[in-house]
Amino acid sequence: MGEQVNFSISEAISRNLEGNTLSYFAKKEFNALFSLPLDKFALAKIFSDMCRFNCLYMISRAGSGHIGSSFSSMDIISWLYLNILKEDDIYFSSKGHDAPGLYAVQAGLGILPFNKIHKLRRLGGLPGHPDVNTPGSFTNTGSLGMGVSKAKGFLFASNFHSQHNKNIYVLTGDGELQEGQFWESLMAFSSSKTNRITIIIDSNKIQSDTYVEKVSSLGNLEAKLRAFNCRTININGHDFQEIQNAFDQRYESNTPLVIIANTIKGKGISFMEHENMSPDQEYYKYHSGAPTLDELLRGNKELIDRLNDVFKLHNLPLLNLSSKGIDSVKKQLSVEKMIPAYSEKLRELIGIDKSIVALDADLVLDTGLIPIKKEFPANFIECGIAEQDMVSQAGTMAMAGLTPIVHSFSCFLTSRPAEQIYNNTTQGGKIVYVGSLSGILPGGPGHSHQATRDITLMSGLPDMSLLEPFNIQSVARLLDWSISFNQKSSYIRLTSIPYETSEELENAEISIEGQGIKLNDGKDITLITYGPIFSYIGLKVRDLLEKKNISLNLIAMPWINILDPGWFKLAISNTPMVVTLENHNINNGAGSHFINLALENSLISNQRVTRMGIDSIPACGNNYEVLEFHNLTAEQISKRLEKIFWDLN
């Protein structure tokens, strides 16, 4: 397998990183591994740690990903692919967070083209969550709770086509079991007979933020599963002999087997393992995101040292590492972060009004609610991964005179509990829905997490105000308006990632309800946009068009479905073109509302109207790649506007 590497390896990798390179195990090292005289247990031990090393490489290279979940399930997935799966069998992960680990295994076995490991969360590479367009992926996952239902669909189809030897294996997370669909999907097993579905629960004890037990205890999980006619077995999910023994029990009776695999989140790198969290550490650090340079070096050394020990034990030659360059990161000139500003304003408002209650769906780190949870525990409810339950609770709180503020990622907050939100609007009471991770960016997680249909879902509801701030000052203003002045319910879209801004945007202040902000007063084209990312892009478009002697009338709208007709008529300045630019699907998005409200009030007559935004399933990649794919960079937009303008003239 090559000559021994000098495993003062941290120094070597450090030099690599300083030269913009990262180290990984190449496919030839995996090929050589399979040719060695090893029993299946020793082979699996080496293989899984090589995959951990490559998984860490992939996440570091991408700048984001889920280490903890990938590592906790790595031994199970490795054993499954090495020893259990037959050619026609189907395996998929319902939770989807462990995609980097799954990709590392599949690439090592040649199921995925190996060079794909260099393109995790990149355009044309490997999506942040599983997608059917990726070799080896049977279904889209990432939105939780759907896995067993999908497995039943695969089983029915295989029976329909008389493929009675096909087995279905689905991995779920223990936090995922808080989603109601998981339990709905088990009910059919009480009457149906099948042993061709195997459910594996990666019970790593930690969900997105903290311990499952602290959020929503699963209680006697085995007893619950047996009540649905499932056979259950508890195992150590890192002991290959126990893993094999569990799979050997698949056909002992004509009922589904559920393997509760007790695992360690971050297993394989000691300081990432949840069992090594300090007693006062409430939140697990390695659920998502990329490691620091120091963490990467320490983790790599620990994996390499353990691999060396195994190779020496078997008197085998040691491994070689390969390296590959990484892209340099463009420095942003001036950056704002919206979530801290939201958190501070909410903290201030709860301090004044104790009827405000913040509800969370296992995302306190992402939604800025940690200060609220610590300072106002009586005004905070952790609902876990159960959006429908959270929203329904908020509905009756509102009827009882409280002011509930509901938090989650926009993609989940507006879709999974859509019926519950509608029910709330029909029974009265004011609720503020706050969606983070709104819009198409960040592009890395993929389409399951990119919220580009939330405006469509929320705008069809009666008495619902839709808002999106464009700077940190407007965050406070819109939250205060929603709580203190608006008599209806509100939906606030928040940008979660740091975003580029400018002095013009930083200093812009929201005016009265229904009125936007004029960022530039031009005469040729009116460009209406919203939110911080596309408002900044609009300013760059303005500068590019100025070089072409085209004057842009640029408006940022914090009010998505509220319009002051008198102001709007003056604001569009009789420009021959009105263009809407949005961080959303163009069908029934904000642009549709702007135009429809204007048409209803006879505010647009002879002007050419154009909408720009997302017009397909959102692409996965780094942020610039995603904007470019959808023709939404400042350069692309300015060229489109220039062509339309000169065609019109």
Image: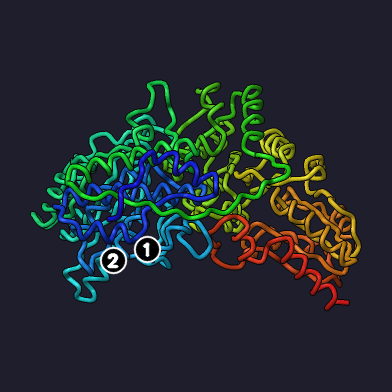
Closest to the observer, 289 or 296 = 296
For label 1, count other residues whose C-alpha is less than 10 Å away and answer few (under 14), some (14-19) or many (20+): some
Q: Residue 380, position in %: x, y?
A: 51, 28
Which x, y percent locates residue 124?
Answer: 50, 65
Q: Is residue 340 above or below residue 1?
A: above
In the rendering, which numbered label is found on residue 154?
2
Label 2 sits on what residue type? Phe
Q: Is residue 176 visible?
A: no
Q: Earlier in the sequence, mark 1 or mark 2?
A: 1
- Picture residue at 53% right of the left edge, 46% below the top: 409
Q: Position of residue 8 (x, y in %)?
A: 38, 38
Name the residue beneath numbered marker 1: 139
Horizontal relation, residue 581 to residue 9: left or right: right
Quarter occupied by the N terminus: bottom left
Depicted 231 relative to depicted 649: above or below: above
Q: Residue at x 38, y 51 (%)?
A: 321
Pointer 1 with pointer 2, Cβ within 8 A: yes
* Front residue of this view, candidates 265 and 467: 265
**What numbered label is drawn on residue 66?**
none
Above/below status of 316 relative to 645: above
Q: Callout 2: helix, strand or loop? A: helix
Looking at the rendering, which quadrant does residue 647 occupy?
Answer: bottom right
Quadrant that contains the C terminus = bottom right
Q: Which quarter of the picture shows residue 165? A: bottom left
Q: Position of residue 77 (x, y in %)?
A: 27, 52
Secondary element at image label 1: loop
The quadrant holding residue 162 is bottom left
Residue type at mark 1? Thr
The mark closer to the camera, 1 or 2, is 1
Front residue of this view, candidates 342 and 14: 14
